Amino acid sequence: MNMIPAINLIATGQNIERLRKDAGLSVKDLQEIFGFSTPQAIYKWQHGTALPTIDNLVILAIVLNVTMDDIVVLDTPERVQSFGRTA
């Protein structure tokens, strides 16, 4: 049976934080770029409790000078299967 990959929220959040730091940006910088009134969304992205919307992911990739594929981490079918999930 084919397994559908899933987004690994924690690893994706770690990528966002690492890429933000590599770009020399603070959470406050991203907050201002996105026009958010608080930094909570960015912290949720970094902690893996939420994902950016598609439009915010596009902007984030542009701001960080990476592709969306560089940001999002997928659990491969093999990894999903090792956790005992089924499709």
Image (tube, rainbow, N blue to C red):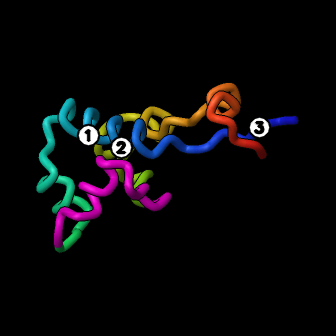
The image quadrant of residue 21 is top left
Residue located farthest toward the front when viewing the structure as drawn: 84
Residue found 58% across the figure and 34% down from its top: 75
**Segment tinted magenta in the rendering:** 38-55
Which of marks 2 and 3 precedes in the sequence? Answer: 3
User: Disc 1 vs disc 3: which is toward the camera?
Assistant: 3
* Residue 52 % position (x, y): 41, 57
Residue at image mark 3 = 3
Task: Find numbered disc 3 in the image and state the secondary structure of the residue it sits on.
Answer: loop
Of the residues shown, which amino acid type is indicated by label 1?
Glu
* Residue 5 % position (x, y): 66, 39
Marks 1 and 3 in Cβ contact (< 8 Å):
no
Residue found 21% across the figure and 59% down from its top: 33
Confirm whether the magenta stretch covers residue 26: no
Whole-Å distance between the Cαs marked 2 and 1?
A: 6 Å
Which of marks 3 and 1 precedes in the sequence? Answer: 3
The image quadrant of residue 56 is bottom left
Task: Find numbered disc 2 in the image and state the secondary structure of the residue it sits on.
Answer: helix
Question: Which mark is on residue 13?
Answer: 2
Residue at image mark 1 = 17
Residue found 49% across the figure and 36% down from its top: 73
Q: Is residue 72 above or below residue 60?
A: above
Marks 3 and 2 in Cβ contact (< 8 Å):
no
In the rendered view, does 54 fall on the left or right side of 80? left
